[in-house]
Image (tube, helix red, strand yellow):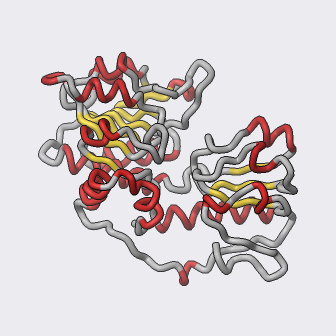
Amino acid sequence: MEGVFPPEINTIYLSPEEITADIVREADALFVRTRTRINEELLRESKVRFVATATIGYDHIDQDYCREAGIHWVSCPGCNAQAVCDYVEEAVSSIKSDESALTIGIIGYGHVGKLVAQMANRNGYRVLLSDPPLGIGISLEKLAPQCDVLTFHTPLTHEGEHATYHLCNADILRLCKPNAVIINAARGGVVDEQALIDKLKGGNEKVQAVIDCWENEPQLNHELLKMVNLASFHIAGYSIQGKMRASEMCLRAFCEFFSLPILSINKKVVPLQGDSAPGWLCRISDQLKAHPENFEQLRKQYKLR
């Protein structure tokens, strides 16, 4: 967002590791991504009244604390949905390139899930849906045995009837068809990584896996990393278009909250870059598997698709 704010708005640009309690103490607003934990430790003695995260996910935000402290926060649902859909399409074509009669199970029918369903239909795949909170489709237990691909597009929640933490667990994996592909481009923790490791060791009953979102990032489970078919450093939603949409959504929310004229981004100054040629996910996977210790660096240096 550099160059967007007028001179009268004092603006400081920082990397995630530079955002500390001392730095934000005099700030009125914060614009962040998932690497910044928005909680009492960061904001207790600050003047912050508004937080915008330029991401779909918001589990890095302590919602209870923000509510108690009177801090308004917003996320950007749907901003990178098309990018995640493109990631899923690339993953499926990379692993199941010789198969056309596929059944794809989509778990979570929000912004991303809808686009994935449209993509699957365009490719002639059979589509099954599971989104119990919305009353859509069938249960995951009924869906799993029928699918060649299970792709997860839910938020990460820990409580309630439809909690998604370890939604893909040993019981679900036990129901999967041999060589079914498990894709997690949602949130780390939606898939039980130890259960997936055990299933990947399952001989003739083993599955295949594509993981973009990991538990305990950036400290990856190296055993799982070695076993999955394709791995990436939490960039499924990273694209020029997605970043633009997220930035514009954050700006609009900021301006509305502070009763300012709506600011916009000059799209002409945003360069198109990155690698979108076929096989880009395989190249990313090779990078991460060769240097898992560089997870954060690889993510920061990733050229947007």
Locate residue 275, reporting x and y percent: 32, 68
Report the label total. Answer: 0
211 is higher (above) or lower (below) than 302: above
Locate residue 135, reporting x and y percent: 53, 25
Task: Residue 193: tell me if it is visible.
Answer: yes
In the rendered image, which quarter contains the N terminus? bottom right
Q: Residue at x 39, y 66 (%)?
A: 305
Q: Nearer the viewer, residue 215 or 52?
A: 215
Q: Nearer the viewer, residue 14 or 68?
A: 14
In the picture provided, is 216 more to the left or to the right than 5?
A: left
Task: Residue 126: tell me if it is visible.
Answer: no
Locate residue 141, reporting x and y percent: 38, 18
Locate residue 157, reporting x and y percent: 58, 30
134 is higher (above) or lower (below) than 18: above
Q: Quadrant of residue 245?
A: bottom right
Q: Nearer the viewer, residue 66 or 138?
A: 66
Q: Quadrant of residue 140?
A: top left
24 is higher (above) or lower (below) than 65: below
Q: Residue at x 77, y 80 (%)?
A: 6
Q: Residue at x 46, y 37 (%)?
A: 215
In the picture provided, is 167 more to the left or to the right than 98?
A: right
Q: Residue at x 69, y 77 (%)?
A: 4
In the picture provided, is 97 more to the left or to the right than 116?
A: left
